[in-house]
């Protein structure tokens, strides 16, 4: 039940968003894509170059660079942890 | 239950409104006829497809005053309500005014936008396949207080993927009518005229959601949306199996980039293989039509004016229409299918390496069509310095206005050789290298800007990957129609005007009632005057005049050359390709296309850069820089090729 940065979660793992530590305008945009505390998120795949990675949140697939994902924290589901 | 049952009856005529209408207002609006309907929805909700469905092929594109957000509007003729104007608002996630798009939407909805009448009612489009998130926009839209119809789009996909929604319950929760539709298939849309009829004939019924969340907080909108969907037995659909499967291949570590390259090569190959015969066929028809029409004219000064001066010039440009339409057909298919977003994901690594935001990819990609909308699209980049860097490099992307001169020179000078059993053509490869050259120039320029004057902190790259979809025939047709209209219009106005001027200057001054010979004309003198400056590039004076005239717009050079070689008795009866082959070396010809790969020959772009950066400094620097690069590159190209071959 560790809290980990989204960028550190392995491909295939899943968890629940714990908090988003980003400037207001960025976190507002992310919030509307579903990145809000309590939402389930899954690490889906990496882009061919390894970064950005694709996350599935709330039925939508969103690509984020690791430099952004580093500031989003999630609580990993036990099975995946 | 059928998936597309309209749920207007959540507001049955005999049921009293939940809340009484406020005094005064509603009665007054009841008597006034409806005029304007606003269409609003988040990005990727299928809003544009619906807009096309409702308005048909007639729509107007303009800019809102003072901002660069585009304004699409059209009469709702396709559903028999030509008396109503539908305004397509920008795709937004919320009305919180972080972005200019959202500010525009709020101003239009509240009737504060200059020149746009206040909408009488609202069509809110939401993607039914992820309703939780999409409903976050509903609360702020409802709070504006206009009669609103909620359209749950892609309901067919929702059902196909095992999702479920109870529209009647949702309508009860929202206090606004709800309908299930599929804009792509055109199903469920009959509910819209019905709603418009009611919204127009009835006073505001005063129905409001029981409670709205704190609108400025995304978290509270989200909680509200989750509560609403939970109460309406919303079943989230399973992930699209096809999208997963396709992404496994298209975003594969090495297959992904490989397929990306293959797609790009294939596009150019087809533009050439299929476009060239079409273009040749058009040339033949237009030439024949021109000479037949010329015979009907009296054999005096009028005939050469119309045939050599106007027809040759405009025809030389118009024949490239098939290639341009083919290119846009491919861009349309790639974008509408959802592949472009994947391409942006693959390209982000490269973009970052040169210090550009991944978000710059989309404007830069649209710069392949035209730099003007691309520069306007950079508004999505929040960081000012990154935005200006993107603006500075965008005109290096190979826009469609370069296509005519590229195609002309390649068809005239590059043999039609095929390699690898006919898969790869030499002509397509040369064309592709020209595109690569422009891209390379953009990379280097961005790198230079980034390491010197414009060091910036990177803005985040956040990219939504939509489900793969089949592009709709209607969407593609509309794109091609718009593009084709624009191209023909330009040929009929700017290009017609400039070629006329070139023709006029090529026959003036009049000596004792006779036109001047080409070399003795104003333009002949001007051409010979500038020739020393361009001779090292392998250009003769006619090309020089072409370059001068194309400062207005790149395609103009083809029109000008068409006119100049048409007026010249030596090349009068030859086609433009043959005339050029006889009048230029290979080195000069390749140098010419290289010049066009780099040069800033476009006044519209300069004007839009001036407007977007609010300063003459940037367009001036851009023009000077690009011209110098073009000159030097063309010089090197000509000298090297002349020595090698």
Image: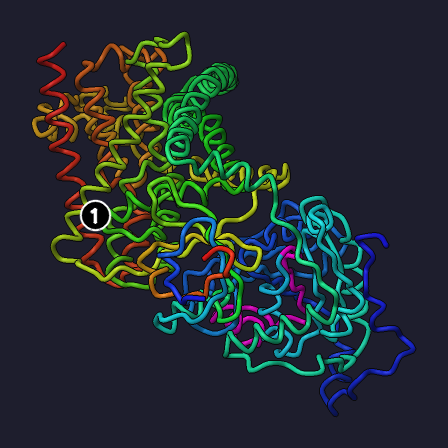
Q: Could you tell me which chain the residue with mark 1 belongs to?
A: B
The quarter holding residue B178 reads: bottom right
Residue B548, by quadrant, is top left
How far across and down, in percent of the image, does residue B611 sit? 31, 60
Residue B298 visible somewhere in the drawing: no
Q: Of B52 and B243, which appears nearest the observer? A: B243
Mark 1 crowdedness (10 Å alpha carbons): few <14, some 14-19, many ≥20: many
Residue shown at 34% from the left, 51% from the top: B358
Q: Is residue A56 at least partly visible in the picture?
A: yes
Seen in the picture, residue B95 relative to B476 is either above or below; the reply is below
Q: Residue B634, percent across and down?
A: 15, 28
Q: Which residue is mark 1?
A: B446
Residue shown at the point (42%, 13%) measured from the top left: B423
Is residue B210 inside the magenta stretch? Answer: no
Indicate whether residue B127 is drawn in magenta. yes
Image-based side of B538 in relation to B293, left or right: left
Q: Quadrant of the C terminus of chain B?
A: top left
Estimate the x, y position of residue B415 in percent, counting from the top left: 31, 9
Q: Secondary structure at mark 1?
A: helix
> Which residue is at a point 17% across and 35% down the rendered structure image?
B630
In the image, B422 versus A20, the foreground residue is A20
Compared with B10, B85 (above or below) is above
Label tally: 1
- Residue B502 in the image: above or below residue B610: above
- Position of the N terminus of chain B by quadrant: bottom right
Residue interval drawn in magenta: B102-129
Q: Is B529 located above or below residue B339 in the figure? A: above
Viewer-proximal residue, A6 or B166? A6
Q: Where, by quadrant of the figure, is residue B554 drawn? A: top left
């Amino acid at each position: 039940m560790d809290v980990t940065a989204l960028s550190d979660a392995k491909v295939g793992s899943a968890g629940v968003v714990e908090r988003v530590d980003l400037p207001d305008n960025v976190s507002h945009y992310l919030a509307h894509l579903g990145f809000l505390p309590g939402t389930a998120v899954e690490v889906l795949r990496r882009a061919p170059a390894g970064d950005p990675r694709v996350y599935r949140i709330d039925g939508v697939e969103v690509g984020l660079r690791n430099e952004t994902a580093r500031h989003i924290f999630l609580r990993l589901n036990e099975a995946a942890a | 239950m059928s998936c597309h049952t309209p749920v207007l009856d959540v507001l049955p005529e005999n049921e009293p409104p939940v809340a009484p209408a406020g005094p005064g207002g509603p009665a007054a609006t009841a008597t006034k006829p409806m005029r304007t309907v606003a269409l609003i929805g988040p990005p990727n909700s299928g809003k544009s497809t619906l807009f096309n469905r409702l308005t048909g092929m007639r729509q107007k594109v303009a800019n809102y005053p003072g901002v660069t957000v585009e304004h699409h509007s059209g009469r709702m003729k396709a559903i028999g309500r030509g008396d109503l104007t539908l305004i397509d608002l920008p795709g937004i996630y919320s009305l919180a005014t972080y972005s200019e798009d959202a500010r525009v939407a709020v101003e239009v909805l509240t009737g504060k936008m200059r020149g746009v009448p206040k909408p009488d009612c609202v069509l809110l489009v939401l993607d039914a396949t992820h309703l939780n998130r999409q409903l976050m926009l509903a609360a702020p839209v409802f709070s504006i207080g206009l009669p609103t119809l909620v359209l749950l789009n892609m309901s067919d996909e929702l059902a196909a993927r095992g999702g479920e929604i109870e529209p009647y319950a949702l309508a009860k929760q929202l206090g606004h009518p709800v309908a299930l539709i599929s804009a792509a298939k055109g199903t469920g849309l009959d509910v819209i005229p019905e709603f418009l009829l009611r919204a127009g004939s009835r006073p505001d019924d005063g129905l409001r959601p029981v409670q709205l969340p704190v609108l400025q907080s995304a978290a509270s909108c989200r909680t509200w949306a989750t509560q609403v969907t939970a109460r309406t037995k919303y079943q989230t659909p399973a992930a699209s199996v096809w999208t997963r499967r396709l992404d496994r291949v298209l975003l594969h570590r090495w297959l992904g980039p490989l397929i990306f390259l293959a797609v790009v090569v294939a596009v150019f190959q087809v533009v050439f293989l299929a476009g060239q015969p079409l273009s040749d066929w058009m040339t033949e028809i237009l030439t024949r039509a021109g000479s037949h029409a010329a015979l009907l004219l009296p054999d005096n000064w009028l005939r050469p004016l119309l045939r050599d001066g106007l027809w040759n010039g405009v025809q030389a440009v118009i024949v490239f229409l098939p290639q341009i339409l083919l290119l846009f057909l491919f861009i349309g298919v790639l974008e509408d299918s959802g592949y472009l977003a994947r391409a942006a994901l693959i390209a982000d690594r490269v973009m970052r390496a040169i210090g550009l935001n991944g978000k710059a990819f989309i404007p830069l990609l649209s710069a392949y069509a035209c730099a003007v909308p691309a520069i306007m699209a950079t508004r999505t980049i929040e960081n000012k310095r990154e935005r200006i860097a993107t603006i500075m490099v965008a005109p290096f992307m190979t826009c469609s206005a370069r296509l005519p001169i590229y195609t002309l020179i390649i068809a005239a000078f590059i043999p039609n050789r095929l390699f690898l059993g006919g898969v790869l053509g030499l002509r397509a490869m040369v064309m592709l290298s020209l595109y690569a050259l422009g891209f390379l120039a953009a990379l280097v320029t961005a790198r230079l800007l980034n390491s010197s004057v414009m060091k910036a902190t990177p803005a985040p790259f956040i990219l939504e990957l939509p489900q793969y979809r089949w592009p709709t025939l209607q969407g593609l047709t509309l794109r091609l129609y718009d593009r084709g209209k624009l191209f023909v219009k330009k040929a009929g106005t700017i290009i017609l005007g400039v070629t006329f001027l070139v023709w006029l200057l090529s026959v003036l001054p009049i000596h004792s009632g006779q036109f001047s010979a080409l070399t003795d004309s104003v333009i002949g003198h001007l051409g010979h005057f500038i020739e020393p400056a361009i001779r090292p590039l392998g250009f003769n004076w006619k090309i020089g005049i072409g370059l001068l005239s194309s400062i207005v717009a790149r395609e103009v050079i083809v029109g000008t050359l068409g006119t100049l070689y048409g007026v010249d008795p030596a090349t009068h009866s030859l086609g433009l390709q043959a005339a050029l082959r006889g009048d230029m070396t290979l080195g000069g010809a390749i140098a010419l296309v290289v010049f066009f790969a780099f040069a800033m020959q476009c006044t519209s772009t300069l004007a839009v850069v001036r407007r977007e950066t609010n300063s003459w400094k940037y367009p001036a620097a851009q023009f000077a820089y690009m011209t110098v690069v073009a000159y030097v590159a063309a010089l090197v190209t000509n000298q090297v090729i002349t020595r090698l071959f």
